[in-house]
Image: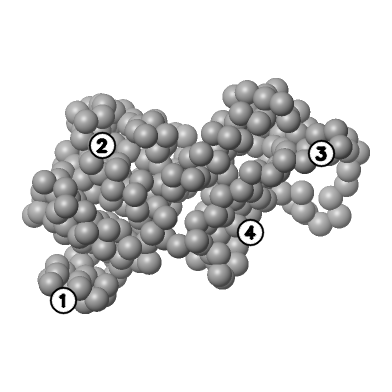
Amino acid sequence: MIKVMVNGAHGRMGLTVVGAVLDEPELELAGAVDAIGADDVGELIGRKDVNIPIETALDRALETHQPDVMIDFTQPAVVFDNVMTALAHKVSPVVGTTGLSDEALEKIRAEAVKQATPAFIAPNFALGAVLMMKFATEAAKYFPDVEIIELHHDKKLDAPSGTAALTAKMINTVRAEHRQGHPNEVEKIDRVRGGESGGIRLHSVRLPGFVAHQEVIFGGLGQTLTIRHDSINRESFMPGVMLACKKVRSLTGLTVGLDKIL
């Protein structure tokens, strides 16, 4: 039985993760943490058989419950410190919070090696999103002109999404960087053409009603190709999260991307 602590347990994603852990026979919910505490996480998800309080101090909760894995769905501003705290307690973090810089990832990688405690980070835990990125990378070999539109709920704090950033990074491994659009184009409204990563334009939409969606649009002579993935609800991420919890302790150092363990 793998003991799991959920950090960010009071959020919408956190509560979904709590329910998934409780329903997974190989996992045991060892604790729940959030800046917003609560007397009983079971009450929040309608489970009368669960009586686990949501604690507010991560360090103390890790020390008290000694889980094997900490799942983190919190916020970009605190995720790095959360991961480093977990590693200091030799608890393996499984992270779905996006917004970590390359520098932060390297520090996490070094700490995971130092503590001999594996860590796992995925920009997106949906299996379909992993396939979308893989298909897009294949298509880019033949369609070098591409733009990415990602659409998320209006409570998401970072832009672009981690999935969009990773998609652009993967595409840029198979195509030469080049500027898209007319060389003399003029933005009459600042940033109306979106952000740019290696010559790829990225556009972020934030609206209520969305969960997590992305389309990668390729343009060629007389044709376009669109690859799109939609997460209709947060349950779409749970198989990937549960898989990471089961596999993370068998890994070494830092692993980034759900594709690495499929």
Q: Earlier in the sequence, mark 2 or mark 4?
A: 4
Q: Which residue bears the numbered disc 3?
A: 223
Residue 261 visible in the displayed image: yes
Q: Which residue bears the numbered disc 4?
A: 205
Query: Please, what secondary structure does the residue beneath circle 2 have?
Result: helix
Q: Earlier in the sequence, mark 3 or mark 2?
A: 3
Left or right relative to 115: residue 109: right
Displayed quadrant of residue 132:
top right
Q: Nearer the viewer, mark 3 or mark 2?
A: 3
Q: Which residue bears the numbered disc 1?
A: 48
In the rendered structure, which amino acid carries the disc numbered 1?
Answer: Lys
Front residue of this view, candidates 198 and 2:
2
Work out which quarter of the rendered image holds the C terminus and state it.
top left
For marks 2 and 4, give the CA distance.
Answer: 32 Å
For marks 4 and 3, give the CA distance.
Answer: 25 Å
Q: Residue at the spot x=33%, y=63% of the render?
A: 16
Query: Please, what secondary structure does the residue beneath circle 1 have?
Result: loop
Q: Residue at the spot x=25%, y=44% of the render?
A: 245
Q: Earlier in the sequence, mark 4 or mark 1?
A: 1
Q: Are marks 4 and 3 in contact (CB under 8 Å)?
A: no
Q: Nearer the viewer, mark 4 or mark 1?
A: 1
For marks 3 and 2, give the CA distance.
Answer: 42 Å
Front residue of this view, candidates 48 and 33:
48
Q: Which residue bears the numbered disc 2?
A: 248
Displayed quadrant of residue 21:
bottom left
